[in-house]
Image (spheres, grey):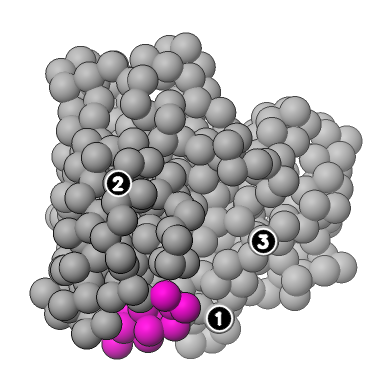
Amino acid sequence: MNYRKLGKTGLKVSEIGLGCEGFLEKEDTFTNELFSLALEYGVNCMDMYSPNPDLHRRVGNLIHNQREKFILQGHLCTIWQNEQYKATRNITEVKIAFEAMLKNLNTDYIDIGMIHYVDSLNTWKQIAEGEILKYALELKSQGKIKHIGMSSHNPIVALEAVNSGVIEVLMFSVNPCYDLLPADEDVEKLWAQSSYEKPLFNLDPEREKLYETCQRLGVGITVMKAFGGGDLLSEYSPAGKAMTPSQCIHYALTRPAVATIFSGVRTMEDLKNSLYYECATEEEKDYATVFSTFNNISWQGHCMYCGHCAPCPKGIDVASVIKFLNLAKAQGEIPETVLQHYMALTAKAGDCIVCGACEKRCPFDVSIIESMKEAKKLFGQ
């Protein structure tokens, strides 16, 4: 298992994490078997959006003896009412639910306190100026949550929250279909087939800006819906063709600031398919080839950081150079962290000999040579 830094939190999370939805309404035996397999393969983090008390008790029992080694992402603003999950902004309900979560998990802290499901600017404003964010900050000062996060499907809202300086971790829906669509407060549009009936071209600029801003500010991204709720793995995919779990995971992990994929697992086979990513070949991870077969969808001219351009005869990590170039261009300046990462590369853009081998291999017809010239000019070497 590979581990990644979660932004500036100091936490190191496994690339593959656990979503909780597949554990709901299951017996203890199933939870124990699934968790045992996950722990055996080095999974060290889980998202707990559900306030289901039975789920919390089962998970709490399983990780109690290794609590310091396991990272829990628990949600504020979710409550258990009439035997079902409900989102709430009522501060009294939020407080009661949080204390119940701690009790049921048999822990005195949550690693990431995730403000749940903020998809409109009005909602974010109410949270930021009201009692919920104030409560989250109180919990952090008390040590009951270590880091404040927020979950969202809307890049404009997420960007507003990230730029506030309060949010340390962003839980966001990242996959190659959702990334094409413009921001909208109606989350249903992300998976509506009608959203993909007209031609779509390249990554939505608001989403690109969000990922790059998170990278610059050190806000770690934890990914939900990497498989589009399973849609991307089936023939009914919005793209018109099924992808594999490894392809979906690799796409998300190559976005700036992404640290872990919370994989939705409903069976042992689901978990094994996600864990397989860690030993998959580069060919099995390759999402670029399948992208070229999608109907009505094109990424032409846009670097997808897929690595098809490699190997460079001068040893340039072309995808990383272009990623750092895009990060700097998005900010209109060169952030110090971006400059440090660029300077740490063993070969720089200035080492390019303009042989064109990379461009011949690029499935998206990116003007790589021009990007190398631009990077050399911007970074000075």
What are the residue bounds of the magenta stretch? Answer: 336-347
As drawn, 339 above or below 291: below
Residue kind at label 3, given as amino acid type: Asn
The disc, 3 or 1, on the residue closer to the chain's N-terminal end is 3
Mark nearest the camera among 3 and 1 is 3
Q: Nearer the viewer, residue 209 or 29?
A: 209
Residue kind at label 1, given as amino acid type: Gly
Q: CA distance from mark 3 to mark 2?
A: 30 Å
Measured as percent of width and height from the top left, residue 57 is found at: 75, 52
Mark nearest the camera among 2 and 1 is 2
Residue at (54% x, 50% y) in the render: 261
Residue kind at label 2, given as amino acid type: Glu
Secondary structure state at the residue bearing disc 2: helix
Residue at (83% x, 34% y) in the render: 30
Magenta stretch contains residue 342? yes
Secondary structure state at the residue bearing disc 1: loop
Please identify the residue farthest to the top as the structure is shown. 235
Q: Residue at label 2?
A: 359
Mark 1 neighbour density, 10 Å: few (under 14) some (14–19) many (20 or more) = few
Q: Nearer the viewer, residue 245 or 270?
A: 245
Q: Quadrant of the C terminus?
A: bottom left
Left or right placement of residue 155 versus residue 40 in this view: left
Residue 10 marker: 1
